[in-house]
Image (spheres, helix red, strand yellow):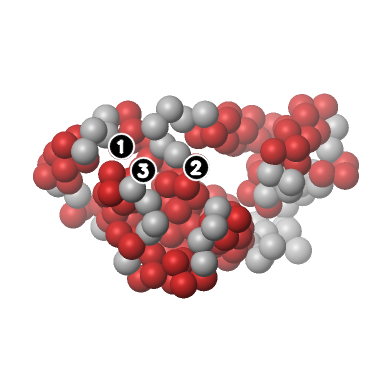
Amino acid sequence: MAIIETVTPEKAKGETKRIYDMMLQNVGVVPSPLQLASASPGILNLSWESIKYYSQHPTLGFALLSTIRFLVAKHLNFAFCTDFNKNILRKQGLSDEDIDKMTEDPLKAPLEQKEQAMLGFVIKAIKSPDDVAQRDMDQLHDLGWTDRDILDALAHGTNMVGSSILMKTFKMDVVC
């Protein structure tokens, strides 16, 4: 049980209800991290703006972003988002075997080579940021990624770190 007061979808009103309704319409569920954000209207709005930004990103596709979220959540033992994103990956057609392979080696994710490279970079940066070097950036640039793409992808991954801490602290990290 959460140790912070949040707004459930059934009790949502005003802007919170509008955001929840959009999530229900587009995803079919209001994810727990978004419900946690409802404790602060400002944080809820920031979370919603982030969701909208990434859902319309011009170069980072849904499959890549879902895979980033899954692998970062898995690395952090972030139960809710590991389970939630694993289900998204299954809905995209990945088998449990595909998911297990990419969990062991992110470069085995069923993505295009360019996306695999970005995924590998994000996971490397999450696990050992001090090991990232100019050559990593050069490799991504050589594949056509821009600095914006690189920053956006890594920010997406690091958002999972903060979300994991918040969910665990307020006792909301439960499997869906």
Mark 3 or mark 2, whichever is nearer to me: 2
Does the image show residue 168?
no
Percent across and percent down for residue 31 are 68, 49
Q: Mark 3 points at which residue?
A: 154
Relative side of 168 to 102, left or right: right
- Placement of the C terminus among the 4 image quadrants: bottom right
Q: Name the residue under label 1.
A: 150
Label 3 with label 1: CB-CB less than 8 Å: yes
Few, some or many residues within 10 Å of mark 3 (<14, 14–19, 20+):
many
Percent across and percent down for residue 117 are 27, 49
Q: What kind of element bears circle 1?
A: helix
Q: Image quarter for residue 72?
A: bottom left
Q: What kind of element bears circle 3?
A: helix
Residue 62: assigned label: 2
Q: What kind of element bears circle 2?
A: helix
Q: Image quarter for residue 88?
A: bottom right
**Residue at 31% of width from left, 51% of height from top?**
116
Label 3 with label 2: CB-CB less than 8 Å: no
Disc 2 or 1, which lies upstream in sequence? 2
Q: What amino acid is at disc 3?
A: Leu
Q: What amino acid is at disc 2?
A: Phe
Q: Could you tell me how far apart the alpha carbons at marks 3 and 1 are, in whole angstroms? A: 6 Å
